[in-house]
Image: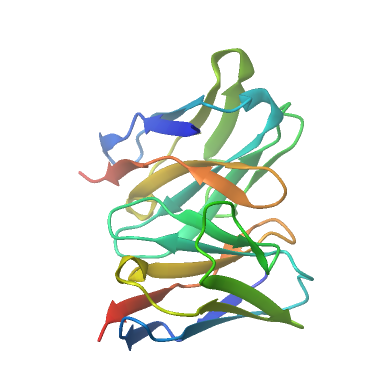
Amino acid sequence: DIQMTQSPSSLSASVGDRVTITCRASQSITSYLNWYQQKSGKAPKLLIYSASSVQSGVPSRFSGSRSGTDFTLTISSLQPEDFATYYCQQSFTIPWTFGQGTKVEIK
Amino acid sequence: EVQLVESGGGLVQPGGSLRLSCAASGLTFSSYNMNWVRQAPGKGLEWISYISSSSSSIYYADSVKGRFTISRDNAKNSLYLQMNSLTAEDTAVYYCANSGNSRLDYWGQGTLVTVSS
């Protein structure tokens, strides 16, 4: 199975900060990488697909990029509603696998 | 508006069975592949099963293979997960989600399955 390693596992940030979350795949997944946001007690929501495409309705402050097997989710200016847990997921091959999650908390 | 609504969760004893359902609306259900994803309490997300739009392709995670069965009824816009031989490790919130182009586009609100004596 492909292992997805996210870092950091948690971070504290202030409103307006630029936040970067990294996800590394254990082997090549080309651009089959998606990012989800999960707020407490709620279902996950798709933010970014194919490494860098922003899902319809998602604010433009969210962006994604790829460098080899390293992927990055960036929030350009953190907003109060962005405090949540973020997961990466590879869809290159089954079984689809998720990173362990990154919890973004208020500083 | 796409809506996926899971049901069928609850408390079940170890070794027991449960059948989950997912009712879909707001999308052409028969055109979409569907998935089950679960989340143990306080833990991350785990993909467990996939079924193609026509049911021609079905996949399972090793953790549930041989115990869980995914199925769908396109006439009823519904997805199912038959879970047998349940253990405490199966305790989780179970989500259904549709997948178009290799991504989980929409998720239901989830249904909690608790395996305990």
Residue toward you, A24 or B87: A24
Query: Which residue is at a point 53% across and 28% down the rendered structure image?
Result: B79
Q: Quadrant of the C terminus of chain A?
A: bottom left
Residue toward you, A63 or B90: A63
Above or below: residue A98 compared with residue A8: above
Residue B89 placement: quadrant? bottom left
Q: Quadrant of the N terminus of chain A?
A: bottom right
Residue B62 placement: quadrant? bottom right
Above or below: residue B18 compared with residue A73: above
Query: Which residue is at a point 52% across and 40% down the rendered structure image?
Result: B67
Most extreme residue toward the left is: B117
Query: Which residue is at a point 69% across and 59% down the rendered structure image?
Result: A91
Residue toward you, B48 or B115: B48
Above or below: residue B41 compared with residue B74: below
Query: Residue A66 at what x, y percent from top left?
Result: 71, 79
Residue A104 placement: quadrant? bottom left
Q: Is residue A78 visible?
A: yes
Colour logic: rainbow
Left or right relative to B98: residue A29: right
Query: Residue A30 at what x, y percent from top left?
Result: 79, 71
Q: Is residue A7 visible?
A: no
Left or right relative to B108: residue A67: right
